[in-house]
Image (cartoon, grey):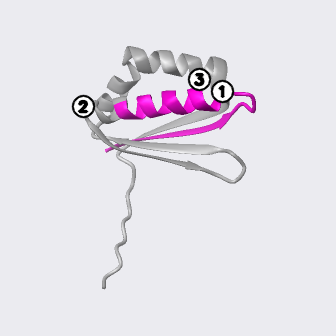
Amino acid sequence: MFLVVFRNRKRADIDQAAYAAEAERMEQMARDQPGFLSFKGYTADDGEVIALSEWESEEAARGWGRVAEHRAAQLRGREAYYESYTLFACDNPRVHRFTAQD
C-alpha cells in the first residue's frame, strides 16, 4: 500500500463553490484511476484539512499525479485556493489494526 496525506489550509477569500466542485471532480477522477484504494478528508476546528488517499503502489499514486486535469487542478490550487499545504507520501506504512469483538 502507498499512503498520501495532503495537509492544507485554504485562503480566506476563495470561491468555496468553485473549490468544492473541483474537489468533487478530482475525487471522482482519482477513484477511477488504476490502483486507487480509498479517500477520506477531515477538517479540523481551526480550518486545517487532512486528505488521505490510499493506493495499491507508489506507481499508481504517481500515475494519478501525472493526469493532466489533476496537474491543472494542482496549479489552480496554488494560484487560487491554498494558503499553504504539505504533502506526505509513504510506501508500505506500518499498519496496526484493532477490531472489537462482540
Say which quarter of the image contains residue 35: top left
Quadrant for residue 13, please give it: top right
35 vs 54, left or right, is: left
Q: Position of residue 67 (x, y in %)?
A: 36, 18
Mark 1 packing: few (<14 Cα in 10 Å), some, or many (20+)? Answer: few
Which of pointers 2 and 1 indicates the residue nearer the eye? 1
- Tell me if mark 3 has few (under 14), some (14-19) or many (20+) residues whose alpha carbon lies within 10 angstroms of its own: some
Instruction: Out of 4 and 20, give the one closest to the viewer.
Output: 20
Which residue is label 1 attached to?
Answer: 15
In the picture, the quarter occupied by the C terminus is: bottom left
Q: In screen coordinates, is 60 left or right of 24? A: left
Amino acid type, mark 2: Pro
Magenta run includes residue 68: no
Question: Please, what secondary structure does the residue beneath circle 3 have?
Answer: helix
Q: Are marks 1 and 3 in contact (CB under 8 Å)?
A: no
Magenta stretch in the rendered image: 1-28
Quarter holding the N terminus is: top left
How many numbered discs sit on the rendered protein?
A: 3
Q: Earlier in the sequence, mark 2 or mark 3?
A: 2
- Which is more N-terminal, label 3 or label 1? 1
Of the numbered discs 2 and 1, the one sitting upstream in the chain is 1
Label 1 vs label 3, nearer the camera: 1
Question: Is residue 50 depicted above or below 100 in this figure?
Answer: above
Q: CA distance from mark 2 to mark 3?
A: 24 Å
Residue to which mark 3 is pinned? 77
Residue closest to the far bottom: 102
Where residue 79 appears, x then y in whole percent? 64, 17
